[in-house]
Image: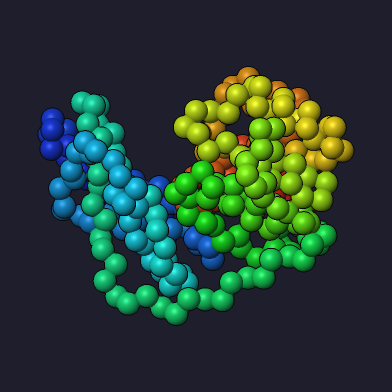
Amino acid sequence: MSGEGVPVRCPTCRRDHVYVPPAYPCACGAPLAPPIQRGAAPSPITHRTWTDAWVTVRCRACGRQSQWPQPELGCSCGAVLRVPVRPVTAPPPAEPSLPEAPPAGARPSGARARTAFRPLTIRTARDAVTTAALYLTWLGFGDVRQAEPPPASGIDVRGRGLVARVDPTTRPASLKAVECLWLHAMTSSARGVHFSLAGYAPDARRRADELHLPLFVLDLTGTPQPVNDVARRLVSAGA
């Protein structure tokens, strides 16, 4: 289900906009966008809470019901608007069985050898680390485990021949963070992988390309997206 443009009028300045809700991949792989409630007036956001940041959406392809980021629209007058979504009223279908994680040491031959990755909704910094660990297991890395408690080194996830850093802050990951991860990977004779919620500074991206370090961004649905070519090759070929 792809997003369609919906007319939205700002209640503050009365400007008209056409809003297209972003589509994210469902766990089944189908594109899914929140169903915007046509004709309903948006409301300015003056205070944010975790509850208000999520809406319930059901996938038409597989029937799975999950939490999705609340659609928002920024108006040129400065107002940030919460765009209403049609509520899910029908009872949810039976929960489908979870795909089995690949066994330790398994090495898929490519993307076709893997089932669709099932994302984990990110509400806390710990959720971001858990999502990265699940995704690295899905890619085929063996013996993936989270650090408890988070270490000063910044290496949040380790596996067989793997070290990974997860930056859950609201600032783009820095050049220093990328270079520190690369040094840890070199001294451990391991592959380094970096995840970030807020993206990467331009110099960090350039340096990661030079060092052949895979970079991924995490959205709040828990779906990692590759940022550079080496990350896209990792997704395509697997670990």
Residue 177 to residue 119: above or below: above
Question: Residue 234 versus residue 91: which sits nearer the camera?
Answer: 91
At 15% from the left and 48% from the top, the residue drawn is: 41
At 38% from the left and 50% from the top, the residue drawn is: 69
Question: Residue 46 versus residue 40: which sits nearer the camera?
Answer: 46
User: Total number of numbered labels?
Assistant: 0
Which residue is most to the top?
203
At 47% from the left and 72% from the top, the residue drawn is: 62
Question: Residue 102 versus residue 111: which sits nearer the camera?
Answer: 102
Residue 135 to residue 232: above or below: below
Which residue is most to the front?
149
The reply, left or right, for residue 157 in relation to residue 34 is right
At 60% from the left and 24% from the top, the residue drawn is: 174
Residue 64, percent from left and from top? 44, 69
Residue 228 seen? no
Residue 163, percent from left and from top? 75, 41
> Is the N terminus in the top left, top right, bottom left or bottom right quadrant?
bottom left
Residue 106, percent from left and from top? 81, 62
Residue 173 seen? yes
The reply, left or right, for residue 228 in relation to residue 118 is right
Residue 120, percent from left and from top? 52, 56
Location of residue 7 (image quadrant): top left
What color scheme is it?
rainbow
Location of residue 134 (image quadrant): bottom right
Residue 80 to residue 22: above or below: above
